[in-house]
Image (tube, rainbow, N blue to C red):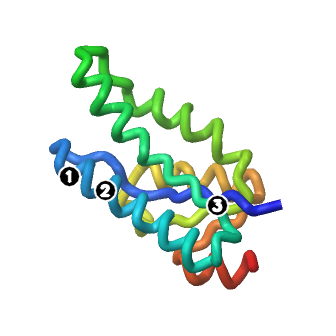
Amino acid sequence: MIPLVYIASKYSAETSGERLRNTHISIDAADELYQKSGRKIVPYPPLWTHYMDERRDYLGKSKMENEEWYAYDNAIIPKCDAMIKLTAHGVSHGADEEEKLAIKLGIPVYYSIDECIGAML
């Protein structure tokens, strides 16, 4: 079975442009993990939901609050085999909480792509 790895990182920011930059960091890390692992690890970058957020805004729909996004992401974390946390402690409340949940569930947390690949392959 191919392992699934959750990518935890900062999303929240003042502007859409900053949130998009944060999204790109997460997606780029996911692509790097997938390629460096020889496509033997499947990354899950939850920040793809930035596009869902932007689409909701474009359509005039109400914004999902942070607590709703936390519940959304927390439903996925237990299904993952590991987590990579890209941001340092204290930089992102959401990523810190995701890390706590992973640890509570016994899901290994890695702090770099190379560390994750070395441990999982």
Q: Tell me: 121 left or right of 66.
A: right
Residue picked out by circle 2? 22
Badge 1 density bin: few <14, some 14–19, many ≥20, Cα 10 Å:
few
- Residue 42 is tagged as 3
- C-alpha span from label 1 to label 3: 26 Å
Residue picked out by circle 1? 18
Q: Residue 63 at x, y = what percent?
A: 31, 22
Mark 2 or 3: the one toward you: 3
**Looking at the figure, which quarter contains the N terminus?**
bottom right
Residue closer to the observer: 36 or 74: 36
Q: Residue 15 at x, y = what percent?
A: 16, 44
Q: Are marks 2 and 1 in contact (CB under 8 Å)?
A: yes
Q: Residue 83 at x, y = what percent?
A: 62, 62
Query: What amino acid type should be assigned to the residue bearing mark 2?
Result: Asn
Q: Residue 55 at x, y = what percent?
A: 30, 28
The residue positioned 20% from the left and 52% from the top of the image is 18
Q: Quarter-wise, where is residue 35 in the image?
A: bottom right
Residue closer to the observer: 107 or 30: 30
Q: Secondary structure at mark 1?
A: helix
Query: What amino acid type should be assigned to the residue bearing mark 3?
Result: Val
Q: Secondary structure at mark 2?
A: helix
Query: What amino acid type should be assigned to the residue bearing mark 1?
Result: Glu
* Label located before the other in sequence (1 or 3): 1
Q: Are marks 1 and 3 in contact (CB under 8 Å)?
A: no
Badge 2 density bin: few <14, some 14–19, many ≥20, Cα 10 Å:
some
**Looking at the figure, which quarter contains the C terminus?**
bottom right
The residue positioned 31% from the left and 56% from the top of the image is 22
* Label located before the other in sequence (2 or 3): 2
- Residue 90 is tagged as none
The residue positioned 19% from the left and 42% from the top of the image is 16
- C-alpha span from label 2 to label 3: 20 Å
